[in-house]
Amino acid sequence: MQNYKRLLLLLCLSAPVWVFAQISVSGTVVDSKNNPIQFASVKIRNSNAGTSTDATGKFSLTIPGKGGVLDVSYIGFKATSVNVTAPTADLSITMQEDVGHLEEVVVTGLASSTKRANVAHAVGTISAKQLVGTTPQATVDAALYGKFPGAIVSSNSGAPGGGISIKLRGITSLVGNSQPLFIVDGVYYDNSSINSGQNFISKAANQGSTDFQENPSNRVADLDPEDIERIEILKGASTAAIYGARASTGVVIVTTKKGKTGKPKIELGQSVGWQMQLRKLGMRSWDTAKVRAIAGANGLAIYNANGGKTYNYEDELFGVHGFMSNTRVAVSGGSDKTSYYAGMTYQDNAGIIKHTGYRKTSFRVNLDQALTKFLDLSVNANYIESSADRGYFNNDNTGTSMGVAYVSTPSWVSLYPDANGNYPNNPLAPSNWMQTRDLTKNNETVNRMLLGGRATWKVLKNNMHDLKIIALGGIDYYTLNTKDIFPAVLQFEKNGNGTNGALLYGTTVTHNDNYSALAVYELNPNNGLIFTTQAGLNAINNNLNTIVNTATQLIGTQTNVDQAGAIQVEQNRVISKDRGFFAQEEVNYKDMLIGTVGIRGDKSSRNGNADKLYYYPKFSLAFNMTSLLDVKALSLLKVRGAYGEAGNFAPFGAIYSSLVPINFNGTTGSIVDVTRGDANLKPERQKELELGLDAGILNNRVGVEFTWYKKDVEDLILKVQTPTSTGFSTGWKNVAAIQNKGVEISLSAVPVLTKEWRWNAQVNWWKNTAKVTRLDVPAFNVGAFGASLGTYRIEKGKSPTQIVGIGDASDKVDPVSNLAVFGNSEPDFNLSFNNNVTWKNLELNVLMHWKQHGDNINLSSLLSDFGGTSADYDKKSLDPKGILSNGDYRIASFGKTARPFVEDASYFRVREIGLSYTFPKELFKDIARVKIGFSGRNLINAFKYNSYDPEVSNFGINAISSNVEVTPFPSSKSFHFNVSVTF
């Protein structure tokens, strides 16, 4: 008994030693040039404990027990590990840059990911630095220009608040959705473009084209680029098949920033700058002969009465240097169990036209919590409030938009108001554009809330088995209010010219939610093989409700819809419910042979049979032969292949024949619409085969990525003519197929790497060609405004983006269609060249973009000719005989040939350029990292296109009828002064 008491006493005395044994470690994480790496993650292996380096690269933590392994990681560097067995206060950890991004983790399934070196398909990735590190970005989609191959990213116009079209690997639909699916932290992000009802004034869809041409912004503009950690772009079905019936146009996966273990990190940023018109065309010079030729005796009388004075209306309308401001505050940090991130951005950008601009406030909070050893929870919330004043531009058939009225008004007609603010009527056009600019309003206001969550149950984890059950979901809720005000005093509204004023008030309420439950199981039998299995279910619900109130015969200056003599209400509801499952198996043999097989099954209320499942398979195989080759200089050699299928729903309402309201002799009722629905419509289906080769040499200082793809899009849906005996004039059918073929090449290199100098360069080259391979109806024209001006034509065996029109004897006119081919909106190729050069604390970033060919239908010039205002009217560069001036030649061609209206839209531009300087940390006693810089967007532009910018689309994000110009809101260039402070 006495010995037992002595043993117990010894254990009690020694308990503090073995219970509280620990090792204190502090040190610095640096790169190969001994520069500190800030905010690198330093974690204790097999533990949630860890920290992150501060602004000077320093860290400190405590390792329980007798030691352990520190895993150190940071974006853009190869992960490294350090074994620590004794206390140390000056540990130095050097990280090697991941030049080829082979350590970068990319998505391979709904709940799995792998190193880029192991993927079997091409995935575009954009880091936070690439996205916003050079210059402030107004919207996320505008920040994607030229930063990855395989995409045509183009601005529809220069109107504030966005309006961007993104097409991945060619044409994927003729009438359906053509924009990729956006997923933000697991939340399906609505990217609708919603018209405000402005067509009531413009009548743009009443003649020539039945498509609306209001150019609204798209809602991905609400997403704050400053919150984004990384973006992954799944460009085709071979990669996006696991997302099923929504993925034929590609998938853009956005991951926002999260907190890291360690001290709180505080980021403050401010940029100010100005934006201005991208390119000025100039004004036509005038004399009495020109005035008489354009406006006759009445015009000459006006010209002489004003003493031949002219006004620089281009500067008056587009000459504002809009002030731009971007304010950023973010706080992040965490412990071994909790991490947090909170960010706020306030953006205020004035447009290049008076009374236009864009203001946005965004708040985001991301929280990650280890609730127990086996249960993790992540939640994120984002609130956005924005307001965009976009002006009144694009095509109209009433001569009332600012753009059409501007080109219709010679510079010798005075439109300025008198001392009392009264505007004169425009004697040569239906509208005084200066009055329209100053008195009308076209505003979009958004209030948006996103909520997302993810719970991970770690059911089992040991050396061989790893099983997780994951539940995730999200809600996307927003209200969009559109307000168009056209006062009764406007020239085109008063005195019987219009409706004595008009108010167009629209409200869209959108409530979308998505939920998924899945299991991920990894089996590692320690024989070189690793099996990753995942399967799950998901549900997606969409509810969009738009109501537009149109009030006319306004009472005085009232702007309430109830203060009007007539009110018209239109409502559009889009409700859909999708359900699906997925399963995927991935096998990895020693990172040398990686194979994946998966399937997705989807059913939707958008299909004719809402209970029918449509299946979308995927297969991929990658063979990394680097380890088999004894070549020192070769750091990567991989061949890969992938096949996948994805879908695209029919346009909403196409599966049934809708009812339209009618008023007959004072009695209201409904009649069947003239378009016949088809309950047997199938989703459009994309089948893509992708083959590729990835190589890296000299420790990946030089890397090459080559991809070839063939994408067949089948069962394309069209609205076709039907026999009148059916009681309908048109109907929806699966009648067409398109094949896209393309090549994507990426070359990355570090040509210079010394202690003080570093030059990173990346060149991307891509090309796509498309062909109509099936057409069950006769060839037809679509998009634009008819063959006399140039239009698109869908014809079997031809490109769906070919531009045709009527022709004369000098054109090659097809004897069957009586049309000539004048061009194609598909570019011959795109090339982007991204450079990052650092010297000591200076950093220079330059992104250049070259688009070769690809044609536009430019109708702005013709409208200017009709008004006699074209800047090149009197030049003689178009007429082959050298007789007619350009303006006279285009007018003479109207109705005879469409040749002059189809123009080469090639360009070269410096999309982004930035020069920054980071102050030595010693100046601020190692407390803060301070960086200042100058940057610009679109500062250098080279093109021969006869307008403001070859990047334009009168029809917005429409799949086919892009690359058409009709007096748009001009694009802008901008420069900024930036400062950021990180604590």
Image: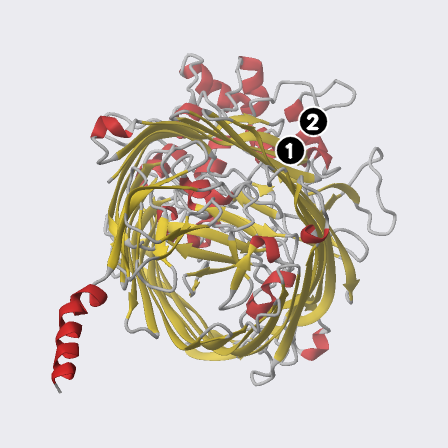
Is label 2 in a helix, a strand or a loop? helix
Relative to the observer, which residue lies in front, 624 or 158?
Answer: 624
* Percent x, y of residue 208: 61, 50
- In the depicted structure, whether residue 301 falls above or below residue 861: above
Residue lying at the far bottom in this picture: please name it: 1
- Numbered label tally: 2
How far is disc 2 from disc 1 in space, using C-alphas?
Answer: 23 Å
Mark 2 or mark 1, which has the lower sequence index?
2
> Is 63 placed left or right of 284 in the picture?
left
Residue at mark 1: 906
Residue nearer the viewer, 917 or 410: 917
Which residue is most to the right? 815
Whether residue 439 sits left or right of residue 18 in the image: it is right
Q: Is residue 442 visible?
A: no
Quadrant of the frame with the N terminus: bottom left
Above or below: residue 585 compared with residue 558: below
| Residue pictured at 82% horizontal, 36% vertical | 811
Q: Which residue is mark 2?
A: 889
Q: Residue at x 68, y 39 (%)?
A: 829
Q: What residue is drawn where x is 68% and y is 50%?
A: 626
